[in-house]
Image (spheres, rainbow, N blue to C red):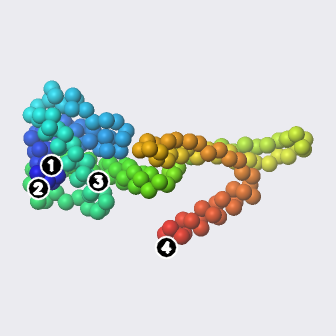
Amino acid sequence: MADLDKLCLLSKVSDTSLLTKFLHECIDDLVETKKANFDNFISSDIQWTREDYDSARVAVQNFFSQSVIEDNLILEPLKLGKNVEETILNCFEIRKNGIFQALAKTAILKNGNTLVENIDWKLKWVLGSSDLATIRDPLLQVQLHCCRNRDEKCEKNTVDFEANLEQVDHLIRELSDIKRHLQE
């Protein structure tokens, strides 16, 4: 059974809020914020076996991933019913940016590149040092929280640096040049 055919399992879910919960849980699992759990749906009105649940979860994840890649969500040939299709569309619209981010992260790490996941910074005002009693210079402290694949695991590290005003200006110029180059 093709992935699109497996999406027909969603038509077994008559409760819109339960379907919404299932779709969001599938996406949470896809973007690796929270693992999908069959136990969350055992006592519900959905008459799924474990195999049905897994098939539907994988189908939803593949469908949403492909829809983000193609920047197009097409449900017409499936004929899932108006409520199910609206629920899928609403969920997709809410979460497509997060799905895109997760797919981009996976692609970047898969190619052996380092990914900057987060940046922390603070501005210090240096009033003196061991060399000079009074300096009064602004100093930018930056922490780049990075991730890189090592043996199929994401290895995290932090790169710390400080920059004076001249170095910050140079960094901004370099980043602007990179952005312009990427947009060409």
Q: CA distance from mark 2 to mark 4?
A: 39 Å
First of labels 2, 1 by sequence position: 1
Mark linked to residue 65: 3
**Residue 97 in sight here:** no
The residue identified by callout 4 is 184
Q: Look at 49% across and 54% down and name the residue there.
A: 113
Asked if the residue under mark 1 is in contact with the one under mark 3, i.e. CB atoms within 8 Å, the reply is no
| Image-quadrant location for residue 4 | bottom left
Q: CA distance from mark 2 to mark 1?
A: 8 Å
Q: Which one is in front, 11 or 6?
A: 6
Asked if the residue under mark 4 is in contact with the one under mark 2, i.e. CB atoms within 8 Å, the reply is no
Q: Is residue 39 left or right of residue 156?
A: left
Q: CA distance from mark 3 to mark 2?
A: 17 Å
Q: Badge 1: how crowded within 10 Å, few (<14), some, or many (20+)?
A: some
Task: Residue 126 in the image: state x and y as whole percent.
Answer: 79, 43
Q: CA distance from mark 1 to mark 4?
A: 39 Å
> Three-letter amino acid code at disc 3?
Ser
**Residue 172 in sight here:** yes
Asked if the residue under mark 4 is in contact with the one under mark 3, i.e. CB atoms within 8 Å, the reply is no
The residue identified by callout 1 is 7
First of labels 3, 2 by sequence position: 3
Measured along the vertical axis of the image, is residue 132 above or below residue 72?
above
| Image-quadrant location for residue 52 | top left
The residue identified by callout 2 is 78
Secondary element under disc 2, as helix, strand or loop, is helix
